[in-house]
Each structure stands twice: as structure tokens, then as C-alpha cells.
Amino acid sequence: MTIFLPGSAALAARLNQTKPTVVLCFCAAWCDTCKEYQPKFESLSAQHPDATFVWIDIEDHPLLLGDEDVENFPTVAIMQGHDVRFMGTILPHIGHLDRLIQAMQAPGKTQDTELPENLLEMLQSVSIS
């Protein structure tokens, strides 16, 4: 499996195929923690083939955050359809994200966030820089 980037044709096709669980990692190219976390995030995507993993550089795509603030990295959102099930900073241990994704598979509450309501559509149509 692989991770997807906002605006890529592969991401648009994936999001059009199904309404999968979408795991978003908000990062920054200058962040050393993000650089170390990205290959682990990509590796984790292979363990969850039904989920769509998206790597978002917040400096390249700030509109994808809406009014949400990123105060630390990694900041992760887990969506099911248009519902945000989790949004927040997690420790940079990939096992934590793995357990969180597993926990989100069960029906449950959504989380109120400041992310744009049309985030999935924005991910498909954002300009590639």
C-alpha cells in the first residue's frame, strides 16, 4: 500500500471508489519528527488496506485545515465518510496510531472539529504544487 497526496489522481480515484476510512496526517516538510514518522505511516498503510492514508503538508495545503490549528506533530485525523472520528496530536509511535485506527472501526461518536466540511472533496481537487 502507499500513502496518497492531496490533489493526486490516485487519491481522487480511491475516494471515488468507496467511502473508506481516511487517515490524514498533517505534517510539515521542515519537521524532523514528521520526516521520521512518514515511512512508518506508509508502512502502516499496508496493514490497513481498506483505509486511505493521506500525507498533508500544512504549508503546501493550509486550506485543508480550515480553522483547525496544528500545535504539534504528528497531528492526525481519522474520518469515516464525512464524519471525523478523531482529530488531534498523537505521540510519534506508529503503534499508537495502529491501535487508534482499530478502535475507530467500531461504530461510535464523531468529534467536533474546525476541519472543512467538504475536506474529502477538497483533497481530490487541490492543486498539486
Image (cartoon, rainbow, N blue to C red):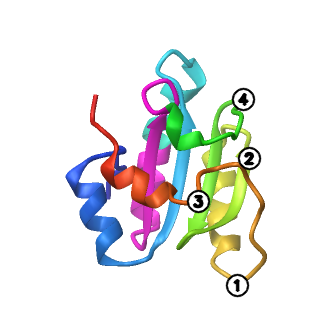
Instruction: State the CA–CA distance, disc 1 to disc 2.
Output: 19 Å
Residue at 64% across / 71% down in the picture? 102
Q: Position of residue 91 (x, y in %)?
A: 73, 39
Image vertical order of residue 66 relative to residue 124, above or below: above
Q: Quick one: label 4 or label 3, which is nearer the N terminus? A: 4
Between disc 1 and disc 2, whose residue precedes? 2
Reading the image, the residue beneath label 2 is 88
The amino acid beneath tag 4 is Asn
How busy is the neighbourhood of tag 4: few (under 14 within 10 Å), some, or many (20 plus)? some
Label 3 – label 2 distance at C-alpha:
17 Å
The amino acid pointed to by label 3 is: Glu
Residue at which label 1 appears: 107
Q: Of helix, strand and loop, which one carries label 4?
A: loop
Residue 123 image offset from top left, x and y in percent: 40, 51
Q: Nearer the viewer, residue 14 or 100?
A: 14
- Residue span colored magenta: 41-61
Q: Which residue is mark 3?
A: 117
Of pointers 3 and 2, the one earlier in the residue sequence: 2
Residue 50 falls inside the magenta stretch: yes
Mark 2 is on which residue type?
Gly
- Where, by quadrant of the figure, is residue 89 drawn? top right
**Residue at (62% x, 65% y) in the render:** 101
Q: Which residue is mark 4?
A: 72
User: Do the residues under discs 1 and 4 have CB atoms within 8 angstroms?
Assistant: no
Depth check, front residue: 76 or 40: 76
Q: Residue at x 53, y 57 (%)?
A: 23
Name the residue nearer the viewer: 32 or 120.
Answer: 120
